[in-house]
Amino acid sequence: TDVSRRGFFATKWQKRLGHLLEGRRRPAVPEIPETELVNNKFNITPRKAILGSKRTGVLAYKIGCMSLWDEWGEKHMVTVCQLDRLHVMKSMTIQNDGYEAVMLGLGYRSIHRQDRPVLGTFIKAGVGPKHHMCEFRVSSDCLLPVGHQMSVRHF
């Protein structure tokens, strides 16, 4: 057998070199379409807000700050945030959990860095592993289906 030829598995030194060079690789330039394609496979329709209704919050990465001027010449500071792969991970209902809430997941994290029990949540939602997860209390009319991808259009 020839030891110098490796098959599927790389040596530990090749893996370590790959991790070191990972930060130098440039990501591919994304193709951004002219119009936004909204996938509404859950048939969620907008409706009027009910008095006392509690909607979900949002998770986002802070990109930075910038200034905007209004028509009177007043300067307003705004924070620029990015919603990156924001999905509904889990819906808590009164029947199952005793309260109503929605768990959201943001971003991407390697599957090897996730805890074992959390992996089941990703599989049930049908989404990839998430960087941040947070739970928001909502009212019953504002519960969203599991796996729904949220965008800024929701707000």
Image (tube, helix red, strand yellow):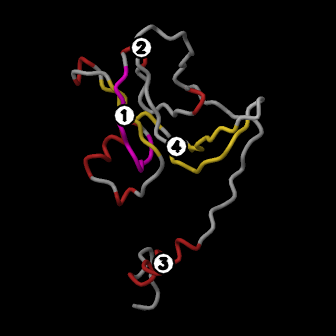
**Depicted 136 relative to depicted 45: above or below:** below
Q: Any mark on residue 20, and which?
A: 3
Answer with left or right where residue 30 lies relative to residue 58. Answer: right
Q: Any mark on residue 85, and which?
A: 4
The quarter of the picture where residue 45 lies is: top right
Q: Which residue is mark 2?
A: 53
**Depicted 24 relative to depicted 111: above or below:** below
- Which amino acid type is marked by label 1? Met
- C-alpha separation, residue under disc 1 versus residue under disc 4: 14 Å
Sequence-wise first label, 2 or 3? 3
Sequence-wise first label, 3 or 4? 3
Sequence-wise first label, 3 or 1? 3
Point out the frontmost of discs 2 and 3. Answer: 2
Query: Helix, strand or loop at disc 3?
Result: helix
Residue located 51% across and 34% down the image: 149
Which stretch appears magenta? 127-138
Query: Helix, strand or loop at disc 4?
Result: loop
Query: Helix, strand or loop at disc 2?
Result: loop
Question: Mark 3 and mark 2 in contact (Cβ < 8 Å)?
Answer: no
User: As rendered, which of 69 and 110 lies closer to the eye?
Assistant: 69
Query: Helix, strand or loop at disc 1?
Result: strand
- Which amino acid type is marked by label 2? Ser
Q: Which residue is mark 1?
A: 103
The quarter of the picture where residue 124 lies is: top left
Point out the frontmost of discs 2 and 4. Answer: 2
